Amino acid sequence: MSRALLHRRFTSLAHSLPHLPLGKAPTPVRELTGLTAAVPVWCKDESVYGSGGWGGNKVRKLEWILPDMRRKGAGTLLTVGGLGTNWGLAAALYGQDQGFSTAIALIDQPIDDHVRAQLVRLRRSGATLHYTRTKRRTIAAAPWLFLRHISGGTLPYFLPAGGSSPVGTLGYVEAALELAEQVASGELPEPSHVVTAVGSGGTAAGLALGLRLAGLQSRVVGVVVNDTLRLNAATVAALAGRTERLLLERGADFPPIGLSADQVTIVREWLGPGYGHATREAEQARSVAATNASLEVEPVYTAKALAALLAMASGGLLDSGPVLFLNTYGPR
């Protein structure tokens, strides 16, 4: 029997939307004391998710994407990301384990120690790397990239940055159902808000849809960390809507949810100069997290999300909590 909670809830999906376990669930939850006195803060630590060479939220998406690739007969996954892409690295490592090739179009971002280390990992991953540098040049190169990576007469399976397709978004519908079980078992209180970084939208969209499916009222707060994509409440809600339609089309049976833009909160104030650029607030959040909560966050995604959480909590924007921080970064 499939262990996926979506399959247990909607048995018809076991055949129409296959799932490949790539990590150990559930991921742990714990209270983070010492961060702020404004609200109780909890963490769901996705950094430990993944049984291969990389962890974090990208692995949740690949659990649904890789079986869909196999179902469609594709041999190569083609995707895009920044020079320090966590998504591209996870896709390359887990795809290779399943016999797939990966090709990544890489867009420039500020170079720091984090990006340098990630580029070393990417070059060792076995992926074919194309340094297209800008979004415009990547779009212009798309026809060539598709032809270049035909495998066995089949075009590559294309995924947007972050794996944030409706199929990939199922990973965080699943994680939201998992969180609901942890709340029901008393491992943590129901959060008033769930705070996560938004780099491509799939994690926030899946959480928002999954929380409603599970009957929780927690509000998703997405902290935008990427200025190369259009990321706002409307686009996140639209992706949740496409994912809902996918579930219904493949046989799930539930009353329509119809998530609207006013049911999620998307904030941009902690982006700084742009994707990958360090900010003073994020560096302060990194220091506080490491010193007071033994929590590792990184400058591109999770430190900015945590900085937003702390500022919003201090400003009374997260009610009385408790607030859940989703730690999505998973180095190995």
Image (cartoon, rainbow, N blue to C red):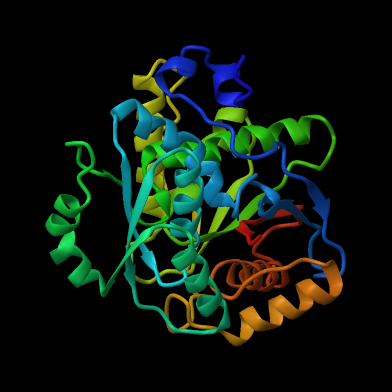
Q: Position of residue 309 (x, y in %)?
A: 66, 66
Q: Position of residue 327 (x, y in %)?
A: 66, 57
Quarter holding the N terminus? top right
Compared to residue 10, the image places residue 214 above or below, namely below
Residue at 63%, 32% (x, y): give it: 177
Residue 276 left/right relative to 49: left
Residue 6: quadrant of the picture: top right
Residue 106 left/right relative to 316: left
Q: Position of residue 302 (x, y in %)?
A: 61, 66
The total of numbered circles placed on residues is 0
Residue at 82%, 30% (x, y): give it: 185
Front residue of 309 and 293: 293
Front residue of 162 and 255: 162
Any part of residue 264 in sight: no
Compared to residue 257, the image places residue 166 above or below, namely below
Any part of residue 218 in sight: yes
Quarter holding the C terminus? bottom right
Residue at 20%, 45% (x, y): give it: 150
Q: Position of residue 307 (x, y in %)?
A: 64, 73
Outermost residue on the bottom side: it is 280
Residue at 22%, 66% (x, y): give it: 138
Residue 268 left/right relative to 295: left
